[in-house]
Image (spheres, helix red, strand yellow):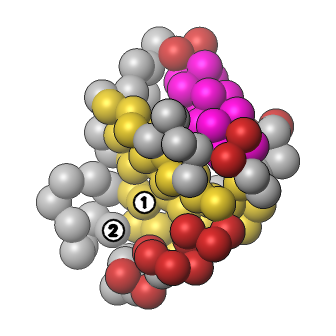
């Protein structure tokens, strides 16, 4: 699967369940464990888990199984490791506290074409 396809699948999965503040960062120049960091907000713990579940389901429907998934038990922050992309689904308070956009500020913000 091409990186653009993967980003589009993830973006559509996030949009389907009304995830908020979707940010894709190209971190290839600043990280060696992934190419893209995805940061997104869920409105509640239940919504965070639902968003993550939808991403996982859409990836599986396209023949991709995440390498790892963490955080579904609490629903404050669910991390989905897709290899080339790491998806962080967080409650707003958790996202504000950890400030991943600032941590990965050297990464280039990219727009995803969902068409």
The answer to whether residue 10 is seen in the rendering is: no
The count of marks equals: 2
Instruction: State which quarter of the image contains the N terminus.
Output: top left
The percent coordinates of residue 36 (x first, y second) are: 40, 57
Report if the CB atoms under discs 1 and 2 are less than 8 Å apart: yes
Residue 54 horizontal side relative to residue 60, left or right? right
* Residue 17 in view here: yes
Q: Nearer the viewer, residue 70 or 62?
A: 70
Can you identify the residue that label 2 sits on? 27
Q: Nearer the viewer, residue 19 or 63?
A: 19
Residue 49 position by quadrant? top right
Of the 4 image quadrants, the one containing the C terminus is: top right
Q: Crowdedness of circle 2 by 10 Å Cα count: few (<14), some, many (20+)?
A: many
Q: Going by the picture, which residue comes out furthest to the left?
A: 32
Look at mark 1 in the image and give the residue it sits on: 37
Residues in magenta, as a range:
47-59
Residue 70 percent location from the top left of the image: 39, 38
The quarter of the picture where residue 90 lies is bottom right
Work out whether 18 lies above or below 28.
above
Q: Give the residue furthest to the front.
A: 74
Q: Position of residue 4 (x, y in %)?
A: 51, 45
Answer above or below: position of 94 versus 66.
Answer: below
Q: Residue at x 16, y 60 (%)?
A: 32
Tell which circle, 1 or 2, labels the residue nearer the N-terminal end: 2
Q: Badge 1, how many Cα within 10 Å: few under 14, some, many 20+?
A: many
Quarter of the image holding residue 2?
Answer: top left
Residue drawn at the location 56% of the way across and 71% of the way down: 95
């Amino acid at each position: 699967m091409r990186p653009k396809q993967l980003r589009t699948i993830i973006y559509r999965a996030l949009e389907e369940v009304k995830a908020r503040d979707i940010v894709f960062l190209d971190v290839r120049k600043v990280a060696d464990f992934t190419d893209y960091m995805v940061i997104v907000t869920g409105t509640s713990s239940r919504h965070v888990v639902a968003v993550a579940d939808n991403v996982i389901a859409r990836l599986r429907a396209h023949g991709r199984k995440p390498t790892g998934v963490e955080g579904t038990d609490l629903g404050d922050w669910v991390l989905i490791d897709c290899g080339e992309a790491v998806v962080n689904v967080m409650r707003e308070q958790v996202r504000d506290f950890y400030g991943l956009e600032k941590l990965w500020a050297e990464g280039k913000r990219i727009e995803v074409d969902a068409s």
